[in-house]
Image (spheres, rainbow, N blue to C red):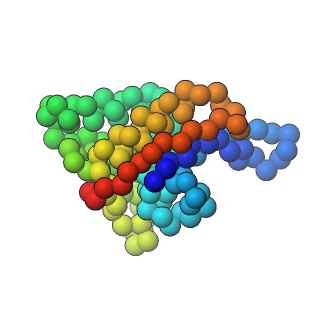
Amino acid sequence: MKLIFTYKNVRAHVNEIDLRCFASIEGCESNWQLPYNKYLCSWLSCDVDTTQSCTSILAQIEQLERGEKELAYGGGNAWFVTIYRDHVDFELQSENEHPDWPIWKCSLAEVKTALIGWRKFLKMPKRLDSAMEIELSPSPA
């Protein structure tokens, strides 16, 4: 499975440019019901939108891997993310309950791979033709 990182212009007016970074699963870019798009890619696009955010979360993951801490957090405005030594829980932050958005888990290895690729992408020029693909091998969390 491949993650695709791109920029899209989110402005309706032709003369205005407001590029936002997006992550999606190759071949399923418009299928936001696919868990990897719905959770992992949405988290990257919404809450982890700077290289500093990526670096901070990756540093926490390294502490987990060295056994220096039991868990870490990687949430932001849209997501509450709990990072464990073997998996990551994604929970939509909301005052209301969302039965269509149950807590979703994926492996720590997948999140780490995604974050490393996302950080590289965010360092690329912010242009519509900037894009990156990374291989993400899903494994049960």
43 is higher (above) or lower (below) than 116: below
Residue beneath the point at 35% across and 40% down: 112
111 is higher (above) or lower (below) than 106: above
x and y percentages locating residue 53 in the rendered image:
43, 32
x and y percentages locating residue 100 in the rendered image:
43, 71
Residue beneath the point at 34% across and 61% down: 104
Quadrant of the frame with the C terminus = bottom left
- Residue most toward the right? 15
Q: Quadrant of residue 109?
A: top left
Residue beneath the point at 69% across and 33% down: 127
- Tell whether 71 sits left or right of 73: left
| Front residue (pair 60, 117) | 117
Q: Quadrant of residue 132?
A: top right
Task: Work out whether residue 63 can be spotted.
Answer: yes
140 is higher (above) or lower (below) than 48: below
Number of marks drawn: 0
Q: Quadrant of residue 62?
A: top left
66 is higher (above) or lower (below) than 22: above
Residue beneath the point at 75% across and 46% down: 11
Task: Work out whether residue 21 can be spotted.
Answer: no
x and y percentages locating residue 7 in the rendered image:
65, 41
| Front residue (pair 10, 116) | 116
- Residue most toward the left? 67
x and y percentages locating residue 105 in the rendered image:
31, 58
| Front residue (pair 63, 124) | 124
- Tell whether 113 sits left or right of 131: left
